[in-house]
Image (cartoon, coloured by chain):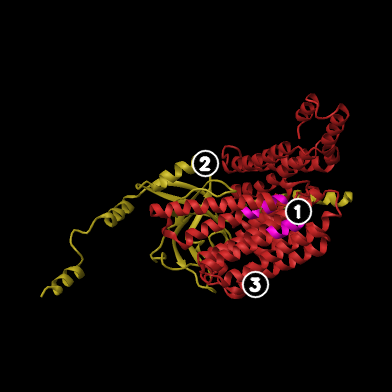
């Protein structure tokens, strides 16, 4: 076997792996950091190990939960997002974030995300994410082209306003909704 | 044959001292230390799995750069040892080279996971697998000596193409993929069979025929497993619904790739063995579109499966592959038993039904053992 071919076969993996590393490192260091509130959890990937999976809870008045988002515009002073708005195709925006259709979440990339962690910490965080009195915050690094990478996760206690809002949602309705009272009235002869 | 047995034959007077020595010399020269091979292979596999889980544990206390640096240094050390010491190591033990090669390739694959972990990239699995194949397949193909390296190449390819196919249909990127897209995916998922003609061609032209034989066998096994699985999909009536098996065209595409690969094997490796291996791969290709036609039809789907395996048994008879023949008989017997339950699903619900089922299973097993014993060809060693 040709010695040169053999040399190429052992050098190729080294160059390739070093290149992948370099690109990963370069991309990771780019961008502005923003803090995004989150909900949710999850474990493990075969090759990369443990991660927590979460849903982004983008701040703002718009209810974005039912829209298939492809791009958002972050407004505020980094790292604090005041509000986000749904970004149309050709709209101008200083701090866009976009889905990566080739990523693991496809078009869901603005709804869900994951963060790789050590297995002990992943286990502990899974518990914290399910705990009610806390708010999870993920720091993302957002780049000019709209790509972004989650880089850290932390928790803070709910503010009194958030606490009140949550309690209001959890409160079971004491009266049946009006529509039900009417319909039961109508059905009687 | 153990030396102890031969010595015993001499002691009891069955053979004279000269015959004993000649037998011992022959056995030593032709010994195939199967247990040792298996141990090396399993050891290498265990190390590879261990590496995956060491990386997966994600040691956050050690800085990412340092961890990646150590990881890459290990890979470089493995590659350097392979480059400078391959011949010397192989002279001492070919299996040491094989194990080193396999472990180095496994370290390379886990490196992608490690980078993903440190830099929080979450690309779909097929991307790191595809890059890994591009970087490491040349090395594995150039230095592989037996099944671990062959398994790494073929297993890696099969894993990669199926990850790609599922990512392209299920991750939501394609809500309702068009026929063109599905045809492309059918083509890609059939591609690993293409290793069969390549390996068949290189088998006679390489100093490592055992590696190419294993690679060809694995590609053939992939084709047969795919065709068998297609008849299973027909049995449960899933054709036409689920995305990857929605269109007949996809099955025709997959079948065409396999038939071309089969033809390639026949051309690349003249002789009975090559012809039969090619025929099996081409036959597996033919089964794919036929399975689509047998969708949701219990008996035709089972008949198609058995026809495939009868074909394999016939090929094994012609080419004198004893093990393959016996496997085919066992598979057909098992499918007959399953078919009997498909046709009469209430067989297990009554006492008489249970007795019937028991008798049927015993009968089929008895017939299968008889066929296997009486008709199995004498082994000619080489196999597919």
Q: Which mark is residue B252?
A: 3
Q: Rounded to the nearest whole Å, what is the CA distance between mark 3 and mark 1?
A: 31 Å
Indicate left or right for B342 with B46 as reference: left
Return the chain for callout 3: B
Which color was chain A given? Answer: yellow
Q: Is residue A75 visible?
A: no
Total labels: the figure holds 3
Residue at left 87%, top 54%?
B205
| Position in image of residue B258 (x %, y %) | 70, 66
Q: Which mark is residue A119?
A: 2
Return the chain for callout 2: A
Q: Is the residue under label 1 in contact with that under label 2 (CB below 8 Å)?
A: no
**Callout 2 secondary element:** helix
The nearer-to-camera label among 2 and 1 is: 1
Q: Rounded to the nearest whole Å, what is the CA distance between mark 2 and mark 1?
A: 52 Å
Circles 2 and 1 on the same subunit: no
Of residues B313 and B176, which is closer to you in this image? B313
Which color was chain B given? Answer: red
The nearer-to-camera label among 3 and 2 is: 3
Residue range in magenta is B313-329
Q: Rounded to the nearest whole Å, what is the CA distance between mark 3 and mark 2?
A: 46 Å
Q: Identify residue for label 1.
A: B320
Of residues B70 and A98, which is closer to you in this image? B70
| Position in image of residue B40 (x %, y %) | 71, 38
Along the polypeptide, which appears first: circle 3 or circle 1? 3
| Position in image of residue B324 (x %, y %) | 69, 53
Q: Which mark is residue B154?
A: none
């Amino acid at each position: 076997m040709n010695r040169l071919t053999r040399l190429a076969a052992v050098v190729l993996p080294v160059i390739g792996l070093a290149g992948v590393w370099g690109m990963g490192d370069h991309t990771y260091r780019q961008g502005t950091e923003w803090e995004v509130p989150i909900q949710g959890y999850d474990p493990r990937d075969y090759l990369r190990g443990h991660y927590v999976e979460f849903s982004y809870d983008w701040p703002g008045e718009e209810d974005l939960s039912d829209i298939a988002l492809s791009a958002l515009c972050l407004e505020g002073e980094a790292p604090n997002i005041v509000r986000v708005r749904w970004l149309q195709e050709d709209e101008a925006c200083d701090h866009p974030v976009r889905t990566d259709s080739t990523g693991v979440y496809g078009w869901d990339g603005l709804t869900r995300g994951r963060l790789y962690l050590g297995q002990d910490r992943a286990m502990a965080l899974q518990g914290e994410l399910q705990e009610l009195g806390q708010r999870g915050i993920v720091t993302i690094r957002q780049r000019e082209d709209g790509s972004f990478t989650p880089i850290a996760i932390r928790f803070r206690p709910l503010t009194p306003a958030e606490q009140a809002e949550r309690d209001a949602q959890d409160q079971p309705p004491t009266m049946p909704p009006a529509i039900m009272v009417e319909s039961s009235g109508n059905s009687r002869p | 044959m153990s030396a102890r047995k031969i010595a015993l034959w001499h002691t009891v007077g069955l053979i004279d001292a000269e015959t004993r020595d000649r037998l011992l010399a022959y056995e030593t020269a032709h010994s195939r230390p199967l247990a040792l091979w298996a141990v090396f292979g399993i050891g290498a596999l265990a190390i590879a799995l261990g590496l995956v889980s060491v990386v997966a544990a994600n040691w956050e206390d050690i800085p990412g750069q340092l961890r990646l640096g150590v990881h890459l240094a290990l890979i470089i050390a493995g590659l350097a040892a392979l480059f400078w010491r391959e011949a010397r190591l192989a002279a001492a033990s070919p299996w040491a080279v094989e194990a080193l090669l396999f472990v180095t390739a496994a370290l390379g694959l886990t490196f992608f996971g490690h980078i993903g972990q440190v830099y929080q990239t979450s690309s779909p699995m097929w991307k790191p697998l595809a890059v890994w194949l591009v970087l490491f397949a040349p090395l594995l193909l150039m230095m592989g000596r037996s099944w671990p390296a062959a398994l790494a190449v073929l297993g890696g390819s099969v894993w990669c193409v199926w990850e790609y196919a599922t990512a392209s249909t299920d991750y939501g990127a394609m809500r309702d993929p068009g026929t063109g897209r599905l045809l492309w995916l059918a083509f890609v998922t059939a591609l690993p069979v293409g290793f069969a003609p390549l390996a068949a061609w290189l088998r006679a032209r390489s100093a490592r025929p055992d590696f190419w034989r294993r690679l060809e066998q694995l590609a053939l096994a992939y084709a047969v497993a795919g065709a068998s699985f297609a008849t299973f999909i027909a049995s449960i009536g899933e054709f036409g619904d689920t995305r990857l098996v929605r269109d007949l065209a996809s099955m025709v595409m997959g079948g065409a790739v396999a038939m071309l690969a089969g033809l390639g094997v026949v051309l690349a490796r003249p002789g009975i063995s090559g012809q039969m291996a090619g025929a099996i791969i081409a036959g597996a290709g033919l089964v794919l579109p036929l399975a689509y036609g047998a969708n949701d039809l219990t008996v035709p789907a089972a008949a198609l499966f058995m026809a495939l395996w009868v074909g394999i048994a016939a090929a094994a008879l012609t080419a004198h592959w004893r093990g393959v023949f016996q496997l085919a008989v066992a598979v057909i017997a098992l499918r007959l038993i399953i078919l009997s339950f498909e046709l009469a699903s209430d067989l297990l619900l009554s006492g008489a039904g249970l007795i019937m089922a028991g008798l049927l299973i015993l009968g089929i097993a008895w017939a299968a053992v008889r066929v296997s014993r009486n008709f199995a060809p004498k082994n000619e060693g080489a196999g597919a």
